[in-house]
Amino acid sequence: MRVLIIRPEREATALATALAERGHTPVIAPLFRLEFLHPPAEFSAALASCQAVLLTSANGARALAEASEQRGRPILAVGDTTASTAEGLGFSAVTSASGDGAALTELVRERLRPADGPLLHVSGREVAADLGELLRPAGFEVKRLALYDAREETALPDSARAALEARALDVITFFSPRAASVFASMVEDAGLATNLHDVTAVAISPAALAPAAGLPFKAVVAAERPSRQAVLDEIDRLAEAPVQGQATMSDTSEPVPPPSAPPPAQTVIMRRGLGVVGAFVVGVLAAVIVLAGALISLPFWPQQARDMWRGHVAAIPPAPGIDLQAVRADASAVATAAVDAARKDLTARLDDLEKRLRAVSATAAERPAAAPGGPDPAVADLKSRVEALEQRPAASGAAPAPNNVEAEKEIAVLTREIAALRATLGALDQAVANQRDQAKALSDAVGARNSGEQKALVAARASAVIGVAARLAGSIDAGVPFASELNLLLPLVQGDGKLTEIIAALQPYAQTGVASRAALEAEFPAVAKAALAEDVADDSYGERLMGKLRGLVSLRRVGDVPGDTTEAKLARAEQALHAGDVGKAAELVKSLPASTSKATAAWLAKADAHLAAKRSLDQLAAYAVNLLGTAR
């Protein structure tokens, strides 16, 4: 199952690790940022005078550990997760109510007496119910102090938005009414409520889901017991078979009153992301889009390509669009060839006519002076004919013919032919210019259509890369293999060198995955203990004994410890891990003395692999954003 986790980061990573161990794919999208508050002035006095401390969340246990170094005060915790967290922080007397706020108040009534002193409730600024009001009828005095605050994010995290847009989620978990209310508001603001039709809501209790009951989930399921383990069991059951109905209990990080009625039962239908069928459908849709683009642009193809399309489909080259440069080159070549041929033909004819004209003119000019000693016989003959004509009666109206009449006629005919040819050449030039204009208009139209299709394809490709990046982020954060997710990027490469480089950088970690930040943080205390032992061990008996003691006892300072000692650097590295800064923690560990390398080498290798995968994922996200920008 692909599970969206909206808890604060520390709880989210722990839950993601548990889900990954069960074969699920977590997507971490914290809706809150945890911030420890400075203890109020009355905190020390209240802690000293109380008979027990009440904890209603794991964050309350962490806040108490930050505010005080006392670990011997009795602790009553609302659930097993809160109790385990308190024990892990060093509190020695912890009792779990294994339930919700009502179970915690019942445990107080059974174990404690009002006469033994007041109770201290360590909580966040906002609580679902006031323990003081619940315990006052039994005579208990409860002092509530807020030592932490879970601040809401301003908008739905990008990982959750991308997963919902890609419809790549099967389950969303809810551990408190406040989280459900914030999620419902953010999903409505993002306009993604309709994307929840295939998602099952799994809540720690009916009350934890009540604020989000109006969302169109496929089904809603409440855990049988109010604990994280029960929520994990419900997710396992969803993965095994369809689930109907809903249970009646839930685990919450704050005490909540029992709800009036559970939501109605709904049928759950399993959905496991895109899978093979989804990938095939996406491929078919992409092929249909490309084919439609080819059919739309068919009228603008060259004649030879159109003939091949109609007669032999297989002979068509698999090009998704029209080569605009080829179209322009063909049109320009045809027009240039036609103009050159016409110019050559007309120029030859003009040259021939001009030669003939010069020859006739020269003959006409030479004839009167051809025989200086006597008249030209042709002229004499012409004169005799003119005289004969002049002797005719005037009524005949015949006009005397001038000398060289035939030559003048031939010159006039040639002149008119030259003028006609020049007019024809002008008309041909105009026709060629019109043909060029039409070819340019056709080329521009094809270019505009091709550009729109290319932008649509680029936008679709960018959306696909964003969806794959979200799935990769979930796998990397959970520390699980991501070979199948990485393979989804291969059809999107299309000769892109940058995307090829990102895939190559992630490929070494795809089969095995990389250690998650939560896993690195969980392993660090043991690494720190071993590093301290190696650091103090030398050849002296006393130092060897100290090294052995360091290896047996996990007593060391934590937090923002100043100095350049190995203990101080390990403390600051662990604090950086708590804050989510794996890079800073790795740099501090690398700066330790060489004597600690044996203890830290394996952890550093895992941290470096985690950081390398995160860097490649950041590059993939930036690449997808840039690709989406070019499509606009």
Image (cartoon, rainbow, N blue to C red):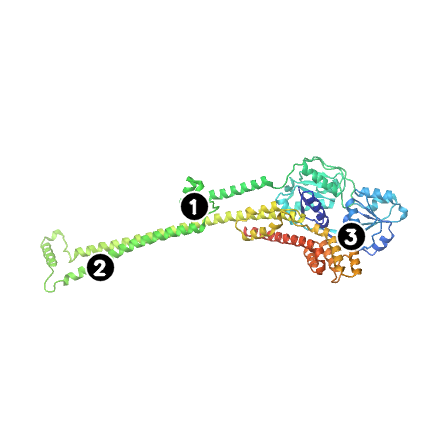
**What is the secondary structure assignment of the residue under circle 1?**
loop
- Looking at the image, is mark 3 or mark 1 earlier in the sequence? 3
463 lies left or right of 387: right
Residue lying at 83% horizontally and 56% vertically, measured from the top left: 41
Q: Position of residue 470 (x, y in %)?
A: 63, 48
Does any portion of residue 363 appear in the rendered image? yes
Q: Nearer the viewer, mark 2 or mark 3?
A: 3
464 lies left or right of 524: left
Q: Position of residue 484 (x, y in %)?
A: 61, 45
Check residue 301 in the rendering and tell me which mark sits there, or answer none. Answer: 1
244 lies left or right of 349: right
480 lies left or right of 381: right
Nearest the viewer among 484 and 536 is 536
Nearest the viewer among 505 and 491 is 505
Check residue 358 in the rendering and tell me which mark sits there, or answer none. Answer: 2
Residue picked out by circle 3: 63
- Looking at the image, is mark 2 or mark 3 earlier in the sequence? 3
Q: CA distance from mark 2 to mark 3?
A: 114 Å
Q: Is residue 552 above or below residue 169?
A: below
Does any portion of residue 184 appear in the rendered image? no
Q: Quadrant of residue 167?
A: top right
Residues at marks 3 and 1 touching, judged by CB atoms closer than 8 Å: no
Task: Specify the amino acid type for callout 2.
Answer: Arg
**What is the secondary structure assignment of the residue under circle 2?**
helix
